[in-house]
Amino acid sequence: MTRKVWALLCAGAIVIGAASCSAADEPGSDGGKVTISYGIWDKNQKPAMEKIAQEFTKAHPDIQVKVELTPGSKEYWPKLQTAAAGGSAPDVFWMNGPRVGLWASQGALAPLSERIAADRFDTSKFPKSLNDLYTLNGKQYGIPKDYDTIGLWYNKDLFDRAGVKHPDASWTWDDMRAAAKKLTDPAKGVWGIGAPAWPQELYYNTIYQAGGYVISPDGRKSGYDDPATIAGLRLWVDILTADKSSPTIKQTQDTDPIQLFQNGKLAMFWDGSYDAIAYNGTEGLNAGVAPLPAGPKGKATIIHGLANVVYAKSKHPDQAWEFVKFLGSEAANRIQAESGAVIPAYTGLEETWVRSMPKLDLKVFVDQVPDAVPYPRSLNTAAWSAKESELLSQAFSGAKDLDATARELAAFMNDALAKEAQG
Amino acid sequence: MRSGRLWPVHVVLAVGAAAMVLPFVWEVLTALKTFTESTRVPPVWVPSFAWSNFAEVWNSTPFVRQFANTVVMTVVRTLAQLLFCSLAAYAFARLRFPGRNAVFVVLLSVLMVPDQLFLIPQYQIVQGLGLLNTLPALFLPGMFSAFGTFMLRQFFLGLPDEIEEAARLDGANPLRIFWSVMLPLARPGLIAFGVLTVLWSWKDLMWPLIVNTEPEKMTLSAGLSALQGEHVTEYPVLMAGSLMATLPVIVIFVVLQRQLIAGIAFTGSK
Amino acid sequence: MNRREWAWGYLMIAPLVLGLGVFFLWPVAQSVYYSFTDWTLFGGSTWAGLDNYARLLRDPEVGQALWNTFQVMVLGLLVVPLAVLVAALLNTRGLRGVPVYRTLYFLPVVTMPAAVALIWRWLYSGEYGLINYLLSLAGVSGRSWIADPHTALYAVIVVFIWTYVGYFTVIFLAGLQGIPAHLYEAASIDGAGRVRQFFSITLPLLTPTIFFTSVLMVMYGLQMFDLLYLMFGKGSPAWADNKTIVLLFYTKAFEEGAKGYGAAIAVVLMAVTLAITAVQFRLQRKWVHYA
């Protein structure tokens, strides 16, 4: 903006009777008191976050925290990006795995490693896979807030009616496929299992259970042309096209499979710990949950969790860090645990969440953490993840051959990753 | 033409009207169903009148506040557009000055640009003015409209010259002529344009969503979007919310449709 | 006198020019500039010259998106004849219930895009959708309209048309009411039937309105965003081949953080819109009948 345009704008603003035309209002710094903002997107967690903010202010009377909710993550990201492009994102905000690479590599997040070391902040209280998720090029950018893993949800009534043994920790892929076939009953409109083309809940898990990988540890190479990776995808393609024990991709696209499971149309469904509240509260649904079955290479589950990050251009980086530290404390995680919305990232506090829904064996999600693989991401995950879901949903729907599609995806991804490396 | 001959016309119109209305009937029915009823196959035609869906919307969004915000945004935008666009439209239609057509064409080029392109720069301006999360942020960019100028210019082009000539010979200046002679003449056109602006403004989604994040400062359309974020596939609740957000403008249209048609007809007369 | 008129002219357009300049024209200029840079998410830009445009020419997604956008525009223009037909029928003398019809046809126009998308997703649903249920009564088995890559774009275009028919019907109805009745009376005396009257009187006199609405509809079609954005769900097989240019721009700029490339895509769209509109204005002399 040139000065002239500003002058004109201000003139216009005065005519309209808008606010003062001095520099933008700095979020309050009056007499040593500072107000920082905290960006979140989940309405259900707002009360817990506000309670944490109040507790924080009790301990630090000269720092106020304003919780800013943007309901729905679909709106949260464009909004946050627009704000960050204008230099005015919240001082502290929620970050997720797929986006951390982009935000950190483009300089929007403050690296926290030095502050962690200087304050002897103990990050070993969080699952290592989560710390890794928010560490790029040896620098940690986020402090884990919560986590989720994937479990095998099943409908007890459908199993009992079909006389099939409930799933347990000993299950393999084959046990699951056989059960799914038995449980499928087209006359009743019941399917053995739901297989939408979802990465986090479905095929990322089977890729690692088959010994494959989505992205190499150095972040340079796609794993989609690796035979083991393709084997992990093939399981779902077989269930969909050969066994026909799942609704088609088009059907699950139309009708949320979560809804199908709630309505007793699916006997099994892979889904995250975050939907436990929904299943626990569904009338007439008698749900159970088991660990994911073992693949050819054994057990694996995708772990993902949010982290609290500090905005690189925050006007109050010290206070923001103080707050992030408090968010990662036992006290703050206890408040999260009591709200029951998510599994707190702080080791030892999962129990509160597990006990919050006694009908369900939620311990399954916590017990899988040792086998957990961090959510695959690169510096610019979005540059290939859209293509990934586009191509794989076509392979899952039978419109395209799986091998060829996987190789096409690998080529595309390797291209995108090479661009990142130059970036 | 005796009305007995009109039944084929009625048949065609009724079929079209059914296609227009059926989705709404379905919306109303779904809004009154419980969640389980809504997913029955074959569909249930008589709902169990689950008013709780509306209560759910009422309790989970600051509905009254958002309604008030939407009204304020719509009213300010509409009045400002009426004033600024009609002033300029009159000048473009009736006054001669160097560069008139060039400026007009440049302004029209705004119509060629997808709205999403303006998001970031406009956000930065509003932020620079320190107006994020305020009511003015909602209406500021929407006070000016290239489309409105275009449409109102058509109105003024359609008005007869003689009256203006008479006023001019009396020595009145253009602003005076505009204010006391042309505006009263163009009234039907202005009302029509006003109604259309109200409709578009009421529906605006992307801008209110980006610029104001606090639920108390949101508009109904942004609030509805937020509701969708929470109840992903709970169609009954979402439909109830949609109904509540849409009813006010339907009422406005029903009340003012005669003026709207008359006003638009006024342009088509040339 | 003349000088004074100039001054008044400038004075009267000043507020609007200022507002549009600051809030609209300046952003466009900025975007054009960005399209020649590698602009990252949060500031930092480097001059890239024509790189973005070179990349755009090689990008198969852009070609696909242009083709989809073109389809939306062309099929969207069906609104014009439909609206003319409805308006002409509504204008039948002695017809009762016109305000009721008018209101019903206008309902979709006043409904928020979020609500429209919601209702239609619900109607199109393969499993619980009303459309497939009605088809099944007729013995036809439906498909998942919105999820099927072959039908998704057309399903959205149907909604697009449905949304705008009422709006343009009202505009045409207004135009029809401006046609003097004595023209029709004279034609009746000459023994012209209703259909002939329509083609020899109504249609020629409506051409200015038809032109105006076609220009608008082309712009709406080229810029359609809300419906697609709201109607396609997460991981839909339909995403791959059914993006339009605006959606592609949005994905690049807001999802992938490639603002410079996104801006280049937007500039291409502007150029296309400008070209098509210019052609429309060129051709209008050939067919638009200004009385």
Image: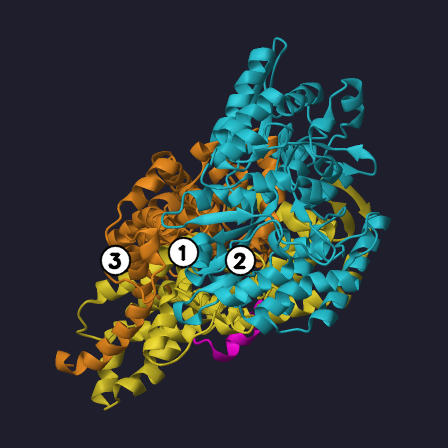
Chain colours: A cyan, B orange, C yellow
Do the residues indicated by labels 1 and 3 lie within the same chain of the protein?
no
Neighbour tally class for label 3: few under 14, some 14-19, many 20 plus, Cα within 10 Å: few
- Please state which amino acid type lies under the numbered disc 1: Asn
Residue at the image position 69 percent from the left and 31 percent from the top:
A126
- Residue A203, picture quadrant: bottom right
Secondary structure beneath dot 3 equals helix
Outermost residue toward the right in this view? A422
Residue wearing tag 2: C233
Residue wearing tag 1: A263
Residue B33 at x, y percent in the picture: 29, 53
Secondary structure beneath dot 1 equals loop
Q: Which residues are magenta?
A: C277-290
Residue C278 is covered by the magenta coloring: yes
- Where is B41 relative to A156, above or below? below
- Viewer-side label of 1, 3: 1
Residue B45 at x, y percent in the picture: 25, 63
Name the chain under label 3. Answer: B
